[in-house]
């Protein structure tokens, strides 16, 4: 199996310098007889399958998260029953440590075969030489069934390095009961309507006297929050990065951060919050509306199982001259080329998981999300039907090597106009200077 990127010490060192705050042997096999010729999709061995014992190393942080453990253990059991000669070995670490764990192992010659990844992690794995193009690893008819804009969002230099299980854009979750009690007659569709609704909700408290925040947008210094902020800019029709990875901010960018500052100045938005903080407030009835990826509802329902009774979703808000577009995010598989036998097993695993049979119940009852393939179009959870077009109008973000650090710089900008109460134009000028240094680095 040919290596698509040579894993050099320099590449590993460069990848490990990235800030990754968010959210066996060299072949990774036991008794495998992998070779270095052909590709997984076309080699004779891949056509016929392998009969020797194979241990497939799958890096997966979700195994450690109580809301997802049972599902992934069920995947392991079902896959091993179908392929008795393949044993899944989970490689685990907490969410914020998963990328470094995989890269550290690779540096020591211990390569995983598949990584359960965030979309924003893809550039790091590509830069480290760990990611193999999906076009070379998977069956062509399997890839052809994905929605084109979804695959585009997972590409670097025209090649697909992430295979999505499902997708989301930043959508609006809202508490139906709070909006009704506040006299908000219709769910906001624009930021102007949001401000009017927030004014009605402001001052409300829960039955036990806790403040109810009208709206939540995360601003804490976590890489994934940068994706939320980028999505907000797209809501206003703005831009952040050009296709070539250079800075390309405009009026829509400025309007987004002016709105964020206004939300903060009026006390509508909890300060310095992470997505999990907003999920906690929403679960406890202390947040009327908030932006989240669709699967964030798992964190809400884990805290309050009754949350489904008062929760509904809506399309991303429109601001300025924008149409409410957002950024696409996903949980995806990144595949590592460890030779024919391992690649064949990895292909079978990925193509086993990303099916309606495996994911329908998961997407409807564990982590609400939008389908990414034609054969999964009926997997749409009822809770997301009102926001069904959120992913189709989402805009891919250029997957640059410095994306993680760049997202953190967006968080710094958000904190400057909220926590530090800086003037928006001044804060953006400071952001431009720092961001350009990161992008040039």
Image: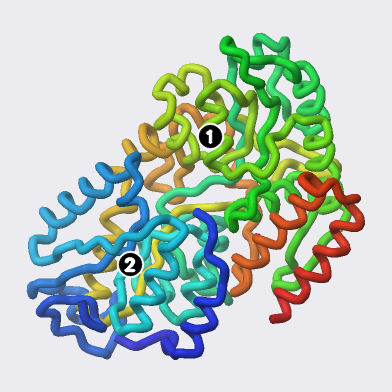
Crowdedness of circle 1 by 10 Å Cα count: few (<14), some, many (20+)? many
Dot 1 or dot 2, earlier in sequence: 2
| Residue holding disc 1 | 279
Label 1 element class = helix
Q: From what the image shows, is residue 105 above or below residue 385? A: below
Residue 367 occupies which quadrant of the picture?
Answer: top left
Residue 67 showing in the rendered view: yes
Q: In the image shown, does 94 or 316 lie closer to the viewer?
A: 94
* Residue 196, percent from left and from top: 81, 22
Residue drawn at x 26%, y 55% is 352
In the displayed structure, would residue 195 be above or below residue 209?
Answer: below
What is the number of the mark on residue 114?
2
Q: Residue 145: give x, y in percent of width and height.
A: 42, 56
Judging from the image, what secondary structure is the residue with disc 2 in?
A: strand
Residue drawn 42% across and 75% down? 131
Q: Is residue 144 visible?
A: no
Does the CB distance between marks 1 and 2 fall below 8 Å? no
x and y percentages locating residue 249 in the rendered image:
82, 61
Task: Name the mark on residue 249.
Answer: none
Query: Residue 180 falls in which quadrant of the image?
Result: top right
Q: Is residue 316 left or right of residue 1?
A: right
The residue mark sitting in front, 1 or 2, is: 1
Q: Nearer the viewer, residue 118 or 278?
A: 278
Quadrant for the C terminus in the image: bottom right
Dividing the picture into quarters, in which one does residue 267 lie? Answer: top right
403 lies above or below 440: above
Q: 151 or 271, which lies in front?
A: 271
**Quarter placement of the N terminus:** bottom left
């Amino acid at each position: 199996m040919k290596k698509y990127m040579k894993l050099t010490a320099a590449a590993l060192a460069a990848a490990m310098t990235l800030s990754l705050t968010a959210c066996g042997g060299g072949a990774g096999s036991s008794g495998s007889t992998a070779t270095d010729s052909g590709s997984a999709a076309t080699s004779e061995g891949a056509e016929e399958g392998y009969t020797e014992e194979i241990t497939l190393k799958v890096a997966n942080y979700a195994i450690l998260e109580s809301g997802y453990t049972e599902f992934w253990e069920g995947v392991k059991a079902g896959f091993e029953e179908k392929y008795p000669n393949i044993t899944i070995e989970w490689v685990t670490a907490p969410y914020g440590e998963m990328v470094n764990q995989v890269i550290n192992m690779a540096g020591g010659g211990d390569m995983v075969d598949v990584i359960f990844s965030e979309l924003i992690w893809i550039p790091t794995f590509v830069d480290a030489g760990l990611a193999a193009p999906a076009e070379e690893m998977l069956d062509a008819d399997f890839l052809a069934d994905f929605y084109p804009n979804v695959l585009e969002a997972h590409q670097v230099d025209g090649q697909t390095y992430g295979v999505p299980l499902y997708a989301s854009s930043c959508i609006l979750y809202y508490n139906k009961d709070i909006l009704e009690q506040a006299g908000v007659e219709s769910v906001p569709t624009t930021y102007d309507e949001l401000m009017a609704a927030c004014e009605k909700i402001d001052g409300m408290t829960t039955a036990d006297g806790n403040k109810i925040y009208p709206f939540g947008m995360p601003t804490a210094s976590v890489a994934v929050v940068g994706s939320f902020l980028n999505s907000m800019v797209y809501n206003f029709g703005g831009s952040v990065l050009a296709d070539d990875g250079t800075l390309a901010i405009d009026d829509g960018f400025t309007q987004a951060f002016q709105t964020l500052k206004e939300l903060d100045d009026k006390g509508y938005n909890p300060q310095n919050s992470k997505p999990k903080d907003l999920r906690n407030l929403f679960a406890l009835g202390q947040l009327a509306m908030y932006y989240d990826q669709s699967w964030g509802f798992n964190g809400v329902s884990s805290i309050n199982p009754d949350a489904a009774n008062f929760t509904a979703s809506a399309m991303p808000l429109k601001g300025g001259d924008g149409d409410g577009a957002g950024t696409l995010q996903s949980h995806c598989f990144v595949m590592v080329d460890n030779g024919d036998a391992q690649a064949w097993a990895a292909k079978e695993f990925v193509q086993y998981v990303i099916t309606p049979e495996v994911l329908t119940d998961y997407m409807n009852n564990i982590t609400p999300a939008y389908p990414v393939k034609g054969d999964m179009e009926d997997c749409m959870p009822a809770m997301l039907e009102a926001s069904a077009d959120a992913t189709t109008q989402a805009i891919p973000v250029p997957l640059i090597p410095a994306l993680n650090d760049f997202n953190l710089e967006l968080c710094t900008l958000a904190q400057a106009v909220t926590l530090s109460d800086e003037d928006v134009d001044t804060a953006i000028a400071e952001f431009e200077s720092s961001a350009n240094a990161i992008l040039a680095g």
